[in-house]
Amino acid sequence: MNTEQIDRIIDKHNTDPGSLIQILLDIQAENRWLPAEALQRVSDKLQVPLNRIRHIATFYKAFSLTPKGRHEVHICMGTACHVRGAKRILDTVQDATGIKPGETDRDMKFSLETVNCLGCCALGPVMEIDGKTHGKLSTAETADVLKKYE
Amino acid sequence: MTRLNSPDALERFRQNLLSGRDPDKPCISICVGAGCIASGAGDVVAAFREEIQKQKLTAAVDTKGTGCPGFCERGPVVVIYPEEICYLQVTPADVPEIVSLTIRQKKVVERLVYTDPVSGEKAVHESDIPFYRHQKRNILCNNIRIDSKSIDDYLAIGGYSALSKALCRMSDTQVLAEVKKANLRGRGGGGFPAGKKWEGSRNAPETPKYVIVNADEGDPGAFMDRALLEGNPHAVLEGLIIGGYAVGANEGYVYVRQEYPLAVENIILAIRQAEEYGLLGKNILGSGFDFIVKVHKGAGAFVCGESTALMTALEGRAGEPRPKYIRSNIKGLWNKPTVLNNVETWANVPLIINKGADWFTQIGTNGSKGTKIFSLVGKINNTGLVEVPMGITLRDIIYKIGGGIPGGKKFKAVQTGGPSGGCIPEAQLDLAVDFDALAKAGSMMGSGGMIVMDEETCMVDVARYFINFLTDESCGKCLPCREGLRQMHKILTNITQGKGKEGDIETLEQLSEAAVEASLCALGKSAPNPFLSTLRYFRHEYDAHIKEKRCPALYCKDLIAFYIDPAKCRACMTCLKKCPVQAIDGGKKKIHIINQDKCTKCGTCIEVCPSRFSAVRKISGEPMPAPIPEEQRLLLKASEEQ
């Protein structure tokens, strides 16, 4: 992500320090993670200390300080999915990819995250990959779904 | 674009809209709420558009993407007007038939309508389906009637008439008095009377004042705010403007979590549309009242659902709560008087203004008036959003509306109130649901999540699950919450792993007491609830885990083992092939045995074992039966046996 792109986002929010979280969210949405240079640029432009920006970037779950893999896997651990066996789905994905929640595998194929509710409880247990929902999963199906991604 | 400068202009515009619409014109409403989209509603919408074009009906039929009508279990849901025929679980392949039969010939496609699983009776109309018949849908009913992206649709069903009435025919004090009289209590969790909160802000000397919609719906298993904001954003907006008028605020915020992209999109669109029509901005409807609304996307922190934390986040900082010696309606956002209410609370306001407090108070119990939306999820047949009058029993919600527990399993408990709520056992199923009764039972209303659990749900694990969630979401400010919950989680995890010891329960109780007494915000104060309520009603399960190292629900992985019953196994090789770790020994006609050393207890074998055999079962707290001798493992055909 280059400086112009970051400046464009900051300008969109009128360089307002009160919009710090909204600015970081836009950068995250465009770049899928927050590189150190981006945080520095935001700090310089908004005149907000870097430590406060890092406080925010680590406090909120939407932000990532490390690059993401080609496919983002979200396992819903909401209560409805939990009572329908979400833990088993998570275990299966961990076994198949070799990574834990919050990690990305070495060849940058998958990033794994757990989320607290995707709001489609009727389909639980649910796994979402790149925004596509896979519902009513069994452990065997979960492993099959993962195989479809390159 | 029309700017509506007076109540008359609004009414004329509405009449104009209605006269241009033919009530007999067929309209296909397809739910495009999150649940149905996940079940493939996007493809269904595309299929309808294509088919209608193909059959040259574009001018004769309307197609609408609407908000969630609640029956997520049978999504995608399609309703055809004016006959109100309700089709469930529609796929793109069904579309040509629906257009040819229902739209052209007014015939019903029988296989797509609701069929009662017990009686086999069919229900063609939405209102005939038992799931809907026992509800009272004052707020949710509009979701399926309007295109969630169209302000004209909202106006056509009488939208913004409450705003017009409030601004131009009532004084601000009259609006406040009406809401107070209705005794509208906050739908987000606490149940604090909205009118009282508004009055506090109104009387506070400082200006400017703010009003906020709290749409940071973080409770796992709860999605009613999402459904409202996605499906009918104008209703929430209308309530907010009315609230601003009553409180004396000219600026409002919608704090919505970014995990709900469609809700963000629809509320931003709704604000723009309202601005264009002059329903937001300067001199609304010629009343002299100015009001603007901004949207703030939440970046993912459960604690930001707490009012003071949310306000801190709005100010652009990390969302940590602050002490409430002075309530936020006196000193809130930027230290100014701020009224914060939940999405559903705001959506109730236009109804109260339009129909009056007397109408509103007819519904409900003594202390809790009106309806409440619950998201009914978990081990339940009809997952979905249900809107019921306060005072309905849990039994009616779970059995009459929810259709009971799937798979003939036995009901164990229902968890209400989100992570810091509590579990209510079967003995209390006849409890009349309202704010006070739930609190008395050791749980709470919360925002309205209702998670049903059956005999296979382990209550110790449920407590562990919620404490884990709250440990994760604790902002870290107060020690008893930050460290105490971490210790509670550790002990509970040990118990579920068979490492529990005498005295654990007492330690957990002490930690709970500290968190309840010494945390600043509601998150910490209520965090031990899941433990306390499961202990209150399910102490025997804790004892079984600690003393007998047994999980009665056969759930906790470390306390169970999988076992193939040699008398039932027909050596079909299904589990053997599917086992991801090759832990099953056997062969064609050779009874299968699980190698316990290799088994990871993933449960695949139980899932895939054909139900006519059901040879795999879980055992806990008892020794593994001795394996059958090798020579008896060969299965002989019945003829060979003789």
Image: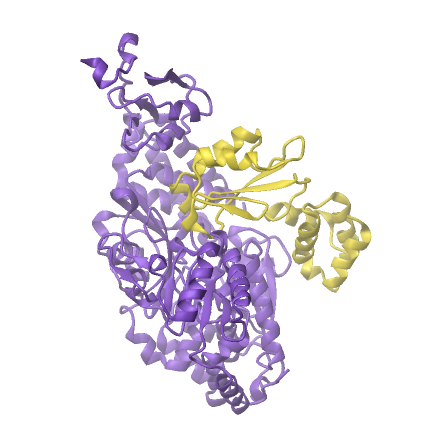
Chain colours: A yellow, B purple
Name the residue at the left extreme.
B642
Picture layout, residue B70 above or below residue B241:
above
Picture layout, residue B554 above or below residue B280:
above
**Residue B406: x and y, percent?**
30, 46
Q: Residue at coordinates 32% horizontally, 49% vertically from top-left?
A: B380
**Residue A97: x and y, percent?**
57, 31
One can see residue B371 in this view? yes
Q: Tell me where residue B585 sits by quadrant.
A: top left
- In this rendered view, identify the residue nearer to me: A38 or B383: B383
Determine whether, in the image, residue B149 is placed left or right of residue B606.
right
Q: Residue at coordinates 27% horizontally, 68% vertically from top-left?
A: B365
Picture layout, residue A147 above or below residue B253:
above
User: Dividing the image into 4 quarters, which one contains the C terminus of chain B?
Assistant: top left
**Residue B565: x and y, percent?**
27, 22
Name the residue at the bottom extreme.
B8
- In this rendered view, identify the residue nearer to me: A46 or B557: B557
**Residue B378: x and y, percent?**
36, 47
Determine whether, in the image, residue B35 is placed left or right of residue B83.
right
Q: Tell me where residue B389 sits by quadrant.
A: bottom left
Labels in figure, total = 0
